[in-house]
Image (tube, rainbow, N blue to C red):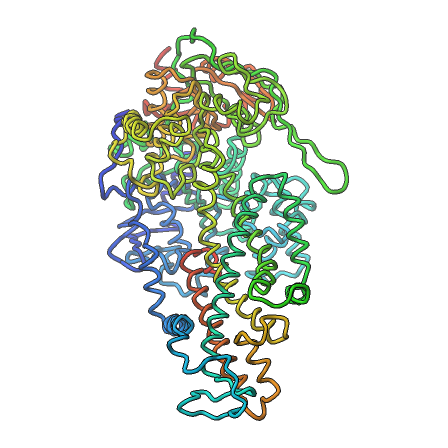
């Protein structure tokens, strides 16, 4: 990102030049998915393509690689010049030669990008085997060198590992090995860190930057995350609905966006610094103490292995309070949520809702207690039964607890209006709604039973940032209107900062730190919390006010 | 932020609100599939077989079990369209009535094994405690060769339609159970099922509304294959003499009877054999079409 690299980049010939690229549906070329996209990527430069889902950013990347699904999408116009050669008109053989040697791609999900039945060493070796004439020993030497270059520990051991034996971050390093071993001129990274935890994400971003500087690679980085953009981009291409909205240097896009759409996107990125909130003095609705959850891995032979998913968790939730449980994947935050909703039986400990114990209660006695705690899940596409009309989904709980159907449907209409949807759409099926609308419907369904506690398990993580902002403000609004207490599970500190009154940080099934949101996020006491905060991408940038945080501090002083 | 939180886009034509045109209806998809020649031929053949069996009393020229010793091995004539067999019985009528037996056995075995398999599969898939026991029993049934079981049953109770149906249905059940159990195991961890649990939905609503509908498509597909294999098994059993008694005309019986006179009168084996082969082929082709339409994931393989 240094000034010198930018200047040398500006002087050099672009590695990739996209001119007026259009992509249409194979059957109906008139329906375009990408229209008139043009931009350059120069050597040593990182160009970030940002946009919400459906903006055409991935389709653009796949067109460059020649990886569009042949029966689905087709390039209908324009040129994609890789070192002056038009990739769109290259023969399949030439394209195969260009991939890996001149351009390479890393994908979002490192597990599915690797072959599960071959060792990673052989998978990297395959690239050399196809494109170079080295003998076996030379190839092995180079693979080990590359494994060391991506900072994998013990390259010799990793060489013989299968993908499932590695962590997500290690797998992504292996994928980077495969992509970069032939030193391509262009690296396309399609959301390479989206599936990773923040601390791993930080390492992978640093690694890409390091290798880029070493080989002067041009990087085309697809992302939806403005935090990542603020970390790594030299230049930014903003896309929306298949068209380029704005192209500019990173600072220009983040500090002085010219287009309204860009302004909206940038300002929708929540701040990491929470607004100070008045302490909540309301009555306690949920009290969890000494909650343990262990999984016993039963085996036919040998001793069973016991995994502790939650250890000695205690928390209190007051009426109208939003408590965030924050942690990386595998930290046990979802386990805690599922125990509180009683989708899982806690191994020990107590969960009291308004003083009534719900841990260890089963069957008939549990049923009346269930309506006090409701849950909203992460994936809006799987949390509504696709065969059932949304109205029926919403009234299901009410009917279960004995309300007549017509009365329940009336109530469903009111609820739909509460979550900002039209009461007239109750007769529709889930596939007729967008992700954000479905999540609103799920919230309406959860609120139907007038619960004391709403558990939101990564409820906004699958949504685009602008939709995310809408759903978050809806939750805040509902909390204010109904006084429901919210247990908000998230891995995203920005989201937590925006909505939570208090925050509990979890790691390896244990509580690390808890307290008011302002305290945890601005003055963390524990090194792990500090590390999480440091890893949050774009923490140096105040998106809402279009300026670096340092400037804001300077302005205050 | 300048986004109105309670004004989501819900206008038609908004790409996010209306992501795709409504899914093609099953009927139009089936209609399209019918346009391919093999499928068209298969459905014509199958419809003809169904028609023949339903209308057998009308179309049959003779009583299929009437013995006429004077006219043994008669050739093709106005009276006996396909000639007669060793007892002077009319081959044409026997083929027609044989179609009835085959379709009844196919349909019966299909319905019985799908229904029983569905119930057992749901129990095994939903109740963890039952799973281990039920599935071991199913493994046990699968370990017994189907023909052997049928022969044992028939020799114990004598060959009747019910015995043959039971003998064919029992070995088919474990495969249906496995299928249903797999679907249920998959679906039970879907968020919409868990949401229903936390909404306090009673068990029957969980199962019937949220879980069982997912099994319908694979069951229809599996059903067509059971249908075909049951017809084949019945023919095999009858041919071996372990199936229906000889007085009931079935394609297997006819082939068994005609076997000895194959060199003298090959038609006695060929007519029922060809009809049997055509029926099975058409049912399997139609089953494939149903699978392609109902289960696109499997079709792509």
Along the viewing direction, whichever of A504 and A99 lies nearer the viewer: A504
Task: Give percent across and percent down for residue A296.
Answer: 67, 33
Residue A302 visible from this viewpoint: yes
Q: Name the residue rendered at 27%, 34% in the picture.
A: A261
**Would you place residue A453 above or below residue A199 in this image?**
above
- The quadrant in which the N terminus of chain B is found is top left
Task: Give percent across and percent down for residue B18.
Answer: 28, 43
Along the viewing direction, whichever of A409 and A209 lies nearer the viewer: A409
Q: Name the residue rendered at 61%, 62% in the picture.
A: B167
Residue A256 visible from this viewpoint: no
**Would you place residue A525 above or below residue A70 in this image?**
above
Q: How many marks?
A: 0
Task: Give percent across and percent down for residue B300.
Answer: 46, 60
Q: Quadrant of residue A305?
A: top right
Q: From the viewer's perspective, tell me whether residue A350 is left or right of residue A14.
A: right
Task: Give percent across and percent down for residue A521.
Answer: 47, 18
Q: Name the residue rendered at 40%, 12% in the picture.
A: A276
Q: Name the residue rendered at 42%, 61% in the picture.
A: B290
Along the viewing direction, whichever of B169 and B298 lies nearer the viewer: B169
**Would you place residue A461 above or below residue B231 in this image?**
above
Q: Residue furthest right?
A: A302
């Amino acid at each position: 990102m240094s000034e010198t690299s930018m200047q040398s980049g500006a002087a050099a010939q672009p590695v990739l030049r996209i001119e007026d690229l259009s992509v249409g549906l194979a059957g109906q070329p008139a329906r375009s998915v990408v229209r008139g996209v043009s931009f350059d990527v120069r050597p040593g430069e990182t160009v970030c393509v940002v946009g919400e889902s459906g903006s055409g950013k991935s389709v653009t990347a796949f067109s460059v690689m020649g990886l569009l699904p042949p029966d689905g999408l087709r390039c209908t116009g324009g040129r994609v010049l890789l070192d002056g050669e038009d990739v769109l008109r290259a023969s399949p053989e030439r394209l195969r030669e260009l991939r890996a040697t001149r351009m390479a791609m890393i994908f979002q999900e490192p597990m599915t990008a690797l072959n599960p039945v071959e060792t990673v060493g052989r998978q990297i070796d395959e690239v050399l085997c196809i494109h170079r004439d080295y003998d076996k020993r030379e190839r092995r030497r180079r693979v080990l060198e590359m494994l060391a270059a991506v900072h994998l520990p013990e390259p010799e051991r990793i060489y013989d590992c299968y993908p499932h034996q590695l962590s997500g971050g290690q797998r992504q390093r292996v994928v980077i090995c495969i992509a970069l071993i032939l030193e391509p001129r262009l690296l396309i990274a399609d959301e390479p860190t989206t599936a990773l935890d923040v601390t791993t994400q930080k390492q992978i971003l640093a690694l890409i930057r390091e290798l880029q500087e070493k080989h002067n690679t041009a990087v085309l980085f697809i992302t939806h995350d403005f935090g990542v953009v603020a970390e790594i981009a030299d230049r930014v291409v903003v896309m929306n609905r298949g068209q380029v909205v704005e192209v500019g240097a990173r600072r220009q896009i983040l500090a002085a966006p010219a287009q309204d759409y860009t302004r909206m996107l940038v300002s929708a990125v929540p701040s990491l610094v929470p607004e100070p909130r008045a302490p909540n003095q309301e009555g306690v609705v949920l009290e969890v103490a000494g909650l343990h959850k262990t999984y016993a891995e039963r085996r036919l032979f040998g001793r069973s292995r016991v995994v502790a998913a939650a250890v000695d968790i205690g928390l209190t939730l007051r009426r109208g309070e939003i408590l965030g449980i924050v942690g990386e994947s595998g930290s046990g935050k979802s386990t805690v949520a599922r125990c509180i909703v009683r989708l899982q039986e806690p191994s020990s400990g107590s969960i009291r809702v308004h003083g009534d114990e719900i841990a260890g209660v089963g069957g008939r006695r549990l049923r009346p207690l269930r309506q006090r705690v409701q849950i909203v899940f992460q994936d809006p596409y799987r949390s509504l039964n696709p065969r059932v009309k949304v109205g029926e989904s919403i009234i299901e709980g009410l009917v279960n607890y004995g309300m007549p159907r017509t009365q329940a449907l009336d109530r469903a209409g009111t609820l739909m209006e509460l979550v900002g949807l039209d009461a007239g759409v109750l007769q529709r099926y889930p596939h007729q709604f967008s992700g954000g609308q479905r999540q609103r419907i799920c919230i309406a369904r959860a609120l139907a039973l007038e619960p004391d506690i709403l558990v939101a398990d990564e409820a906004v993580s699958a949504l685009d940032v602008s939709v995310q902002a809408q759903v978050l403000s809806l939750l805040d609004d509902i909390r204010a209107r109904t006084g429901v207490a919210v247990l908000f599970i998230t891995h995203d500190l920005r989201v937590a900062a925006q909505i939570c009154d208090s925050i509990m940080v979890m790691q390896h099934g244990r509580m690390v730190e808890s307290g008011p949101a302002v305290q945890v996020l601005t003055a963390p006491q524990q090194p792990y919390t500090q590390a999480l905060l440091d890893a949050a991408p774009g923490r140096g940038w105040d998106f809402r006010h279009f300026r670096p945080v340092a400037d804001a501090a300077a302005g205050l002083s | 932020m300048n986004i109105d939180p309670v004004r989501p886009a819900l206008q038609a034509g908004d790409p996010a609100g209306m992501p795709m045109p409504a899914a093609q209806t099953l009927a139009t998809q089936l209609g399209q599939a019918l346009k391919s020649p093999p499928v068209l031929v298969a459905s014509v053949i199958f419809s003809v077989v169904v028609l023949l069996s339903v209308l057998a009393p009308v179309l049959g020229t003779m009583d299929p079990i009437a013995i006429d010793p004077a006219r043994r091995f008669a050739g093709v004539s106005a009276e006996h369209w396909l000639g007669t067999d060793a007892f002077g019985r009319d081959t044409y009528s026997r083929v027609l009535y044989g179609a009835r037996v085959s379709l009844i056995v196919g349909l019966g075995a299909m319905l019985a094994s799908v229904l029983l398999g569905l119930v057992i599969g749901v129990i095994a898939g939903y109740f963890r405690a039952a799973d281990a026991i039920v599935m071991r029993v199913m493994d046990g049934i699968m370990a017994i060769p189907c023909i052997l079981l049928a022969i044992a049953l028939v020799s114990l109770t004598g060959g009747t339609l019910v015995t043959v149906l039971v003998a064919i249905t029992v070995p088919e059940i474990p495969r249906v159970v496995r299928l249903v159990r797999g679907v249920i195991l998959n679906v039970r961890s879907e968020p919409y099922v868990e949401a229903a649990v936390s909404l306090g939905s009673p068990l029957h609503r969980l199962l019937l509304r949220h879980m069982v509908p997912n099994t319908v498509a694979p069951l229809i597909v599996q059903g067509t294959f059971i249908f075909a294999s049951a017809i084949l098994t019945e023919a095999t059993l009858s041919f071996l003499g372990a199936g229906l008694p000889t007085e009931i005309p079935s394609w297997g019986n006819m082939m068994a009877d005609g076997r000895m006179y194959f060199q003298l009168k090959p038609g006695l084996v060929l007519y029922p054999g060809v009809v049997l082969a055509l029926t099975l082929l058409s049912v399997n082709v139609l089953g494939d079409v149903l699978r392609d339409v109902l289960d696109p994931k499997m079709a792509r393989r």
